[in-house]
Structure formats: C-alpha cells, structure tokens
Amino acid sequence: MTQSLTLRRPDDWHLHLRDGAMLKGVLPESARHFARAIVMPNLVPPVVTGAQAAAYRDRILAALPEGAAFEPLMTLYLTETTDPADVRAAAVSGLVKAVKLYPAGATTNSASGVTNFDRVREVLETMAEIGLPLCVHGEVTDPAVDIFDREAVFLDRVLDPIRRTVPGLRVVLEHVTTADGLDYVRGGGPDIAGTLTTHHLIINRNHILAGGIRPHYYCLPVAKRETHRLALRRAATGGEACFFLGTDSAPHADAAKESACGCAGCFTATNTMAILAHVFEQEGALDRLEGFVSLHGPAFYRLPPNEARITLVKGGPVDMPARILTEAGPVTVFDPGFPLHWRVNG
Ligand SMILES: NC(=O)N[C@@H](CC(=O)O)C(=O)O
Ligand SMILES: [Zn+2]
Ligand SMILES: [Zn+2]
C-alpha cells in the first residue's frame, strides 16, 4: 500500500546558501521543497548592513532556477559596530527578518562576531522594541570549556544574561543539540524558540568518531551523546510549538571537509524532507510533521504559513545522490545511514 501525506509547503528557518558558484549549485536543492528560508549571513565578508543584505538577496533571486518559487528571508550578521538605525530600517522595510549572533570564533566564518556584549546592547534594545528576532549560535568559545559542553555553558554565561539585560528580546536558539538547550527554550516563555536540524536527529558523537573519523558528520555544534539525540527527537516529534526545523544545511566542497583541518557543516538540503518523514513515521508522529516544518516557524516569525502544498509519498527505496556537483566542487549529501522510502511529489 502506498502511503501519502500532504502538507503545507515547508520552510527552512536556518540555511546556508553561500555565494557565487556554490550558491548556484546548492540553491535548487532547497528551492525544490522549501518555500522560504532564513538565509545565514556568514559569507566572507559577512552580510552586515541592510544594503549588503539587499544585494545578497538579489544574487540569490538571480541564481534561482527558472520557475522556482522560493523566498529568501534575509538576516544581518551582528558585529560590535552594527548600527541600530540600519537594523531598524532594514527590518521595517521588510527586507530583514532576523539578526544573527555569532560569538567571535565560534563557527565557520565567525571572525567578525561579538566578543563584548555591552557593545551590541543598543542594537538588541532596538530589536526588542520592534520585535525582530535574534538568531543565536549558542556556543561559548572559551578554549577552557570542553567542546561538548559549549552549548550548555553558553546558556548560563551568555544567553541568560543577555535576555535579562534586554527584556522582550525575541530569540531563536539555533541548532539545539542538548537536552539543556531544549529545557532552556521550554522554560523561556513566548519570546524564545529553538530550531532543530535534520542531522542532529540522526547522528550522535559516535557517528563522527567510532570506527574511523567521518568528516561529513562533523558540524557545529558538534553532535552530542545519544541521550541528547533522543531528547532532540522527542522535541521535534512531540508537537511543541517552540521547536521547528532549521536544517543548518551547510555546504562545503568535499576537499574542504576531507582535510587535516576539515570545515564544520552537514549538507542536508537534498534529503531533509525524506529523512524527516522517516523519523516522524518511526516515532508514530507523521501527523506532527506539518507543525514542525510548516507551522511553528511562521508562527514564531509572525509570518503567514504557506498556502501551497507538497505531497510526500512512501514507496520503494529512493535513490538519493551521494553528492551534488557544483562549479565550486562536489558536495557530499548527508548520509542518514539507512535507506529512505519517502519522496516529495511536487
Ligand atoms: N553548522 C556548521 O557546522 N557550520 C555552519 C555554521 C554554523 O551554523 O555554525 C557553516 O556555515 O558552515
Ligand atoms: Zn551555527
Ligand atoms: Zn548554520
């Protein structure tokens, strides 16, 4: 018996599209299934001003395949010299939907991130006033903190003080990887939400390190132990409105991943919907997939859900490409480690 499931077209609330040849190669993978995406600003140099966001948006639209209906939702990269008036204008015009906080040095292309949080206070106060969300890469960068503890320590040392100092600031804790992060979001009231990635529902830290080092499973925040993965699955499939999909699909050319110092990021744009249908089915929660991918995100971002629909169909094993070829080099597609049976029709 074929099984099928029709949903409102999903959105991706955390996506890396890059620029130039890589953008051209990866954009169709997201545009095929997703209506909108919050586009991360960690280009080199980063997207800091409203004018830079407008120019980047134009480059994305120009790279879209013929006939694709995909709306990039732009973000600004918060630096210690970000101008509150520029943020306000970019938000009020509708161009920018969030500001992104990278602690300096926390992840890929984050060198211009924030070190001294007092210097961004005025921007954060402006954002609280106009309701513009702050998307947070929630890891401390203190070398004395173990990499597996960096998310949990960030909540106490950085996020909680920011939220106390700037009441009313709306926050998305991005790519939550720990039970601590989930509990922080759950206990934080209506002004905080969390995005969950596809890959963190599938892998734990053994997948990266046991039986050989697997660079294509290396991302930041790094996958944690199994108890955390199980907690993430419960959060994603449990129907809680404060959690929604942000794939964090983060392409790097294979040569940059398969290296003595490999880049962080898993590329999941191609097979995210097939993997999520599998996960939600396994958890007996297919009826909650639409909330996770299509409803909770727009509600937090105060945008209407999409009117268009997609249909997922379950059948024989689906052929997924092991990698996509881009003019910036081949990019390996995240391997969930099991065959996929769901495909997206239309
Ligand atoms: N997630 C990652 O491992 N990498 C992201 C950056 C990020 O989201 O932290 C990237 O830009 O490659
Ligand atoms: Zn990040
Ligand atoms: Zn990311």
Image: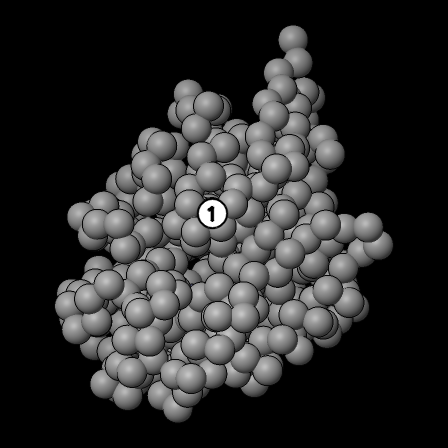
Local secondary structure at mark 1 = helix
Residue furthest toward the top? 1
Q: Residue 55, how many percent across, how many down?
A: 66, 78
Q: Residue 195, how many percent across, how many down?
A: 40, 51
Give the answer, above or below, for where 84 lies relative to 279.
below
| Quarter placement of the C terminus | top right
Q: Residue 132, how many percent across, how many down?
A: 39, 65
Crowding near pointer 1: few (<14 within 10 Å), some, many (20+)? Answer: some
Residue 246 in view in this figure: no
Residue closest to the eye, 214 or 113 = 113
Residue 32 in view in this figure: yes
Total labels: the figure holds 1
Residue 174: name its quadrant.
Answer: bottom left
Residue on which disc 1 sits: 298
Residue closest to the eye, 108 or 89 = 89
| Quarter placement of the N terminus | top right
- The answer to whether 141 appears left or right of 261 in the picture is left
Q: Residue at x 76, y 50 (%)?
A: 68
- The answer to whether 321 appears left or right of 136 in the picture is right
Amino acid found under the numbered disc labelled 1: Pro
Give the answer, above or below, for where 249 lies relative to 230.
below
Residue closest to the eye, 238 or 200 = 238
- The answer to whether 42 appears left or right of 58 in the picture is left
Q: Residue at x 44, y 78 (%)?
A: 87
Residue furthest toward the right? 66
- The answer to whether 67 appears left or right of 198 in the picture is right
Residue 117: name its quadrant.
Answer: bottom left
Q: Residue at x 39, y 91 (%)?
A: 81
Q: Residue at x 39, y 83 (%)?
A: 84
Give the answer, above or below, for where 252 lies relative to 236.
below
Residue closest to the eye, 139 or 312 = 312
Residue 148: name its quadrant.
Answer: bottom left
